[in-house]
Image: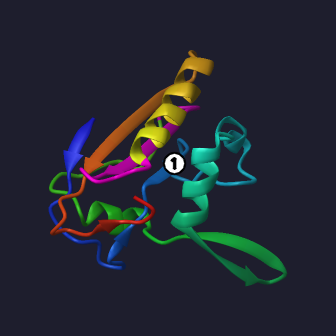
Amino acid sequence: MELTAIARPATSEVIPLLYVYDDHGVNVTEGHPLARMLMAPAFRKVEREAYWGEVSGGGYYRVPWLDACSQASMLRDPLLFRAPAGGLLFVQYLSPICSECTSIATAIHGVINANPALPVRWVRISVPPEIGSLQGG
């Protein structure tokens, strides 16, 4: 699915390059059961850039710079931030000057090719320069 951002995110000027969700709308990050499929260096790098950490109640939590509501606010049409049942949803942000976008796309293709039975939805969102800049891009 190809979309174009029409507004800046409400919470940030910088837009991370990738978020990955499971079928419950939960971010797939280190420690999530499906994270074992996201071991390519490109995934590790964008995960470090897309989240900040918080310690609370003795636990450490990864918090996305852009939550699903902030991402949805950038789009004209609604987007369900849930993967197909038992699968993964990749939400990739792209710009014409993104140096890392190709390595991320290659890593996503690697997951798809290595797991042909895995249900995957891949949403690519183009971000015009006047909307915002991509983090790491």
In the rendered image, residue 71 lying in the magenta stretch gets the answer no
- Highlighted range, magenta: 84-100
Q: Position of residue 118 (x, y in %)?
A: 57, 23
Q: Secondary structure at mark 1?
A: strand
Q: Is residue 94 visible?
A: yes
Q: Is residue 16 above or below residue 38?
A: below
Which image quarter is the C terminus in?
Answer: bottom left
For the residue pair 120 and 137, the one nearer the viewer reads as 137
Colouring chosen for the image of the structure? rainbow
Q: Position of residue 77 (x, y in %)?
A: 18, 51
For the residue pair 129 and 89, the one nearer the viewer reads as 129
Task: Give the residue drawn at x 59%, y 32%.
Answer: 86
Q: Is residue 115 visible?
A: no
Which image quarter is the N terminus in?
Answer: top left
Q: Position of residue 94 (x, y in %)?
A: 31, 50
Q: Is residue 40 above or below residue 61?
A: above
Task: Give the residue drawn at x 54%, y 35%.
Answer: 107
The number of numbered discs placed on residues in the rendered structure image is 1
Residue found at the far top of this picture:
116
Q: Which residue is mark 1?
A: 20
**Amino acid type, mark 1:** Val
